[in-house]
Image (cartoon, rainbow, N blue to C red):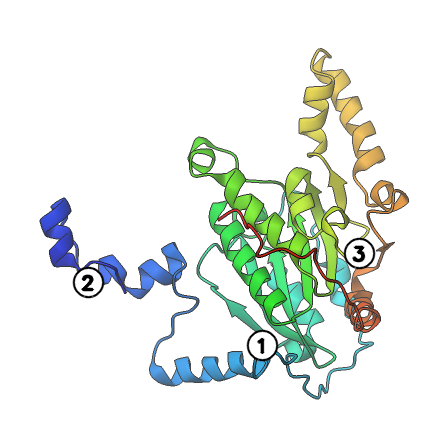
Amino acid sequence: MYVTGPDVVRTVTHEEVSHEELGGYRIHALKSGVADGAFENDLEALTQVRRLVDFLPLSNREKPPVRESFDEPEREEPSLDTLIPANPNKPYDMKELILKVVDEADFFEISPDYAKNIVCGFARLDGQPVGIVANQPQVLAGVLDIDASRKAARFVRFCDAFEFPLITFVDVPGFMPGTKQEQGGLIRHGAKLLFAFAEATVPKITLITRKAYGGAYDVMSSKHIRGDINYAWPTAEIAVMGSKGAVEIIFRNQTPEQLVEREAEYKARFANPFVAASRGYIDDVIMPHGTRRRIVRALKNLKGKQLTNPWKKHDNIPL
């Protein structure tokens, strides 16, 4: 896939490029995000398309189809209690959490090879189709960059358009720093995800597993942008930034020994979800093993949610 072929490129820009290098699957499935998936052969492609279609409603006027589930909605998963490493800088696989929470470990991921620091896809919880958005700590520590913001924003808009409840798993240290990101318009692209979550009227359930720092915490379906039910694990940290960086700014004139003491104080005070919970930004601090049960119950509570945005000719998403 390309707008202009290799011959035109050679004539206009004098670049020597092959068809594959210009518009092959590696370009669109891994780098540009134009393709939402790439498969080895037509049989696999058709099989995966069938999986996708099974989640979708027959038209924009219908709800996504509910299927019978053989997975117990009250099922607990004790292994989730040890998912988060003791070292806060050590990564873990967010997909493990997703697979252990959803029905029968069936998760259809969208654009799995593009912007891997965020995971988007469809699953079912007690038979109800849902859209899942999750930070991936294994890739770039789960930060939000331009590509991740665009990928997730488009997926959230799709889910809202077709009435998929949104489940968001949060472990985000912030937005990606650097001149390349800023010059590429990270503020504008990050605003796309903020806008998509804020405008969505479907049920929105959020779970913070570990880090939720700064503006990236706000963007990931927080209470501040109309999240309906927001949970946190006891390992969650909701703050402007990590304790070390915060202490070095707040107490910049103190000695290294004093900074170590201040960092310990900061951790004891803010490196937990209870401050945010006391202010109403978190609805409940839950144990990891009960995650599936609590999310399924939250979905049932929000089943009759009715919310309409103020009338306008059309919205003005920051394209």
Question: Label 3, label 2: how many angstroms apart (C-alpha)?
Answer: 48 Å
Residue 40, compared with residue 172, is above or below; it is below
Q: Residue furthest right?
A: 278
Label annotation for residue 60: 1
Q: Quadrant of the N terminus?
A: bottom left
Q: Nearer the viewer, mark 1 or mark 2?
A: 1
Q: Quadrant of residue 62?
A: bottom right
Front-most of 61 and 22?
61
Q: Which residue is mark 2?
A: 19
Which amino acid type corresponds to the residue marked 3 in the rendered image? Tyr
Q: Secondary structure at mark 1?
A: loop
At horizontal 75% and vertical 43% (from top left) the residue drawn is 237
Residue occupying image coordinates x 59% and y 81%:
57
Evaluate whether residue 52 shows in this view: yes
Q: Quadrant of residue 214?
A: top right
Q: Point out which mark residue 231 bears.
A: 3
Residue 95, given in percent of the width and then of the height, sits at 60, 64
Return the disc, 3 or 1, that comes first in the chain's sequence.
1
Among numbered discs 3 and 2, the one appearing first in the sequence: 2
